[in-house]
Image (spheres, rainbow, N blue to C red):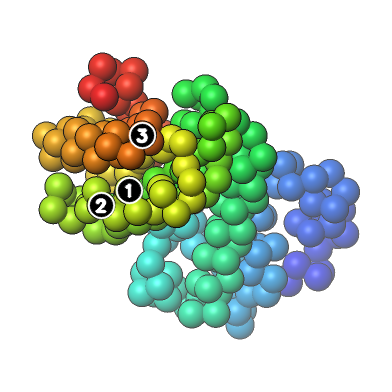
Amino acid sequence: MGICDWPEQERPRERLLRAGAGVLSDVELLAIFLRVGVAGKSAVALARDMLGHFGSLQRLLHADSREFGQLHGLGPAKYAQLQAAIELARRAVAEQFEREALCSPSAVRHYLRNQFALQAHESFVVLFLDVKNRLINSEEMFRGTLTHTSVYPREVVKAALRRNAAAVILAHNHPSGVADPSEADLRLTTALVQALGLVDIRVLDHFVVAGSQVHSFAESGQL
């Protein structure tokens, strides 16, 4: 039986419009995103199969296009739609912080968790701030395995000068799920502090993000 045959008060879209998205289950939200199912299977049944296949919503949203396409009824178009929805949500949160001062560690942590959410690759991000610690711009400057040789301090300095930044916050993620900084992370931070200090740009902190864990170099006395 298709969703259109369900009683109206039980249909996911109608429930969302009536009571808000928060009352829906993961399966129901996915069903609304899918819009339609496949032959012999409603959107709700397909959504249930998706969660069963990946084991969790996190793993589903982390899936690459190849993994996503392993389920019948899911292809490049659906994968692109999902990635676009994730990116829109990330940018919406980023807009909020661009209007506010990143003046507390908790505000920065929240911003960075959003920035790195669902990201499977390792990347190095620089937050450029004005004299009032308001976000000018956030930019992913390097991607891949991060070492002292793959993150170039001169490029960070040039980017900060172009934006007339008074200070920066450095951040990178550990997709492994462990937020503890490595020796390479410590050496890189020292090199960046020295390079930016030559042009009077302060490094306020360096954060390592691993899922919900966020390690602060400043709070740990490592800056």
The image quadrant of residue 84 is bottom right
N-term mark: 2 or 3: 2
Label 3: state its secondary structure.
loop
Please, what is the three-letter code of the amino acid marked with disc 1? Val
Q: Quick check: 78 above or below 169?
A: below
The residue labelled by disc 3 is: 200
Left or right, residue 130 beside residue 10: left
Point out residue 34 in the picture as x, y percentages from the top left corner. 63, 69
Point out residue 70 in the picture as x, y percentages from the top left corner. 39, 74
Identify the residue shown where x is 23% and y is 30%. Answer: 180
Please, what is the three-letter code of the amino acid marked with disc 2? Arg
Identify the residue shown where x is 32% and y is 44%. Answer: 172
Tag 3: Cα neighbours inside 10 Å, few (<14), some, or many (≥20)? Answer: few
> In this view of the protein, can residue 71 be seen by the observer?
yes
Identify the residue shown where x is 24% and y is 48%. Answer: 153
The residue labelled by disc 2 is: 154
